[in-house]
């Protein structure tokens, strides 16, 4: 290991299993002190009986690293404040926030209950916003006091947020919202020494094992492209000082591949100089679409 994260204090939400656990172990291996947040709930957000955060802390300590567990609900102001305060009180500083917590309640839109919509938006989107808000408030205070932070936030979106995913309207909307939040935060917080980026990972987790079981299955031999540990090296780099100057970006990460996603950009355009009538607008739209790039397919579309 390179010691890239030596001396940094890193907070990771949803770090008891899957991607979050892999990130926590990777940061610790590079010298970071890690606050492992996990509420210990099931794949659908219902309460669990064990403490996955504690198990990850034990793994880190057994390997010679420093870590502690936080079991608060980061989709509440109280839980988010407690998370940031835990890092500051235990280690005296905060350098990196990795927002990763989430769960699924998949339904086709016509069968999607309001509660399932609210629950997924709450954990994924609000659960990104609140820790980000309170971490940013700390870093703003540090910057105003003349202690310029080298602060990093890594958010977790998804291919579903970039392209949409059949049967995951709530999840797709939440993950698209995280991209928008990332772009706004990067623009607002740069003056305080905070860089904000997002990843859209493809990896084997509790969520993807059920939804994409065949694709996510581990191979008997050779490179395991869906291992969550494949995603963590980029997250560690984005979460450290080595990534200076990189902000407001979204990266797809899968196996050994890293892709910079380029988002919405203006395509073919026409300007009449005055108002269109409906027939003209439709005719023009069809001509523009004929010259436009064909969008990538929504996940699960047939």
Image (spheres, rainbow, N blue to C red):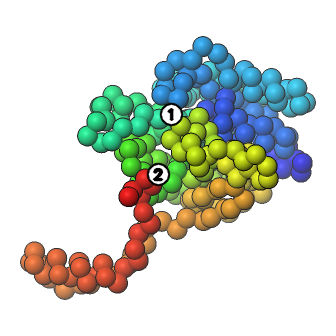
Q: Secondary structure at mark 2?
A: helix
The image position of residue 93, as x and y in percent, is 73, 35
Dividing the image into 4 quarters, which one contains the C terminus?
bottom left
Around disc 2, counting alpha carbons within 10 Å, would you say few (fewer than 14), some (14 to 19), or many (20 or more)? many
- Quarter of the view holding residue 258: bottom right
Work out whether mark 2 precedes mark 1 in sequence or the reverse, and give the earlier one. 1
At horizontal 78% and vertical 41% (from top left) the residue drawn is 27
Relative height, residue 199 to residue 23 (above, below): below
The image position of residue 92, as x and y in percent, is 76, 30
Q: Is residue 28 left or right of residue 113?
A: right
At horizontal 67% and vertical 29% (from top left) the residue drawn is 16
Residue named by callout 1: 103
At horizontal 37% and vertical 79% (from top left) the residue drawn is 292
Q: Secondary structure at mark 1?
A: loop
Around disc 1, counting alpha carbons within 10 Å, would you say few (fewer than 14), some (14 to 19), or many (20 or more)? many
The image position of residue 154, as x and y in percent, is 62, 48
Q: In the image, which disc is placed on residue 160?
A: 2
- Quarter of the view holding residue 134: top right
At horizontal 53% and vertical 37% (from top left) the residue drawn is 210
**2 and 1 marks in contact (CB < 8 Å):** no
């Amino acid at each position: 290991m390179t010691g890239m994260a030596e001396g940094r204090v890193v907070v990771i939400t949803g770090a008891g299993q899957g991607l979050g656990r892999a990130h926590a172990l990777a940061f610790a291996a590079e010298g970071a002190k890690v606050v492992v947040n996990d509420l210990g709930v099931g794949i659908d957000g219902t309460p669990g009986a064990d403490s996955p955060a504690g198990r990850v802390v034990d793994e880190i300590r057994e390997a010679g690293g420093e870590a502690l567990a936080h079991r608060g609900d980061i989709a509440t102001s109280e839980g988010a404040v407690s998370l940031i305060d835990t890092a500051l009180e235990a280690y005296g500083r905060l350098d990196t926030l990795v927002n990763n917590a989430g769960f699924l309640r998949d339904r086709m839109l016509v069968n999607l209950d309001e509660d399932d919509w609210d629950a997924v938006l709450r954990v994924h989107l609000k659960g990104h916003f609140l820790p980000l808000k309170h971490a940013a408030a700390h870093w703003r205070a540090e910057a105003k006091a003349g202690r310029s932070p080298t602060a990093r936030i890594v958010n977790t979106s998804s291919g579903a947020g970039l392209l949409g995913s059949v049967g995951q309207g709530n999840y797709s909307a939440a993950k698209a919202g995280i991209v928008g939040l990332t772009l706004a935060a990067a623009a607002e917080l740069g003056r305080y020494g905070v860089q904000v980026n997002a990843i859209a990972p493809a990896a084997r987790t509790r969520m993807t094992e059920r939804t994409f079981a065949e694709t996510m299955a581990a191979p008997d031999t050779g490179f395991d492209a869906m291992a969550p540990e494949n995603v963590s090296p980029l997250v560690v780099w984005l979460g450290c000082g080595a990534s200076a100057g990189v902000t407001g970006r979204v990266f797809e990460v899968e196996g050994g591949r890293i892709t910079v996603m380029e988002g919405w950009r203006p395509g073919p355009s026409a300007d009449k100089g005055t108002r269109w009538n409906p027939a003209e607008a439709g005719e023009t739209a069809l001509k523009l679409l004929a010259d436009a790039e064909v969008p990538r397919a929504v996940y699960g579309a047939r």
